[in-house]
Amino acid sequence: MPRKLKSTDSVPLRDGADASAHGCLLLVEDNDDLRGSTAQLFRLLGWDVLTASGMRAAVELAMEHRPTVIVTEAILPDVRGYNFARTLRSAVEHDITLVALTRLSEQSFDELRAAGFDLVFAKPIDVELVHAQLVRT
């Protein structure tokens, strides 16, 4: 049975693996270490990953690279997730799946969905679970 990936794992992409098997994913997280380790895990699962630490950079990357998925912390220093979802949806001209990551209570999940997020996950996240949900949608 394969071992479960952890956010602290640092395993290089295996030779010959298609780094974009699932498309482009933009990861928005203000914590540098968490952003790096989570991006690495998504890459291991076959995503082409872009990263940003805040809303402004995320919007610019989303407009330029047109990711199919944006996974973001719900509360960033420069914006709350509720406004971020609306900003992203109005700024990009293509279909995206928006995923919120939060330490807020599960009661806030419905509010995040109403604000424009497609999926909401509690932190700390299980990257394999998020990946499984994304490839099903």
Image (cartoon, rainbow, N blue to C red):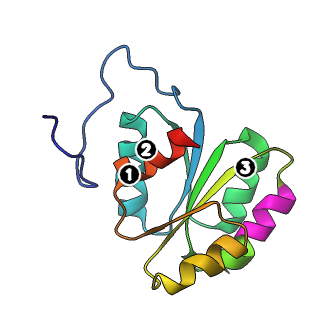
Badge 2: how crowded within 10 Å, few (<14), some, or many (20+)? few
Q: Name the residue under label 2.
A: 132
**Residue type, label 3:** Ala
For this orientation, the residue located farthest to the top is 16
State how far apart marks 1 and 3 are (Cα): 23 Å
Viewed as shown, does residue 121 lie left or right of 129? Answer: right
**Residue type, label 2:** Ala
Depth check, mark 1 against mark 3: the one in front is: 1
Q: Residue at x 57, y 44 (%)?
A: 25
User: Magenta stretch?
Assistant: 85-91
Query: Where is residue 28, by image quadrant?
Result: bottom right
The quadrant the N terminus occupies is top left
Of residues 125 and 43, the one nearer the viewer is 125
**Residue type, label 1:** Leu
Q: Residue at x 39, y 35 (%)?
A: 45
Tell whether label 2 touches label 3 (CB within 8 Å): no
Residue 78 seen in the figure: no
Q: Which residue is drawn at 34% across and 68% down?
A: 124
Indicate whether residue 90 is drawn in magenta.
yes
Badge 3: how crowded within 10 Å, few (<14), some, or many (20+)? many
Classify mark 2: helix, strand or loop.
helix
Q: Is the magenta stretch mostly helix, strand or loop?
A: helix
Q: Residue at x 71, y 48 (%)?
A: 96
Query: Where is residue 84, by image quadrant?
Result: bottom right
Q: Which of marks 1 and 3 is nearer the N terminus?
A: 3
Tell whether label 2 touches label 1 (CB within 8 Å): yes
Q: Name the residue under label 3.
A: 62
Seen in the picture, residue 80 relative to 73 is either above or below; the reply is below
Q: Residue 42: give x, y in percent of width and height.
A: 42, 43
Seen in the picture, residue 12 relative to 72 is either above or below; the reply is above
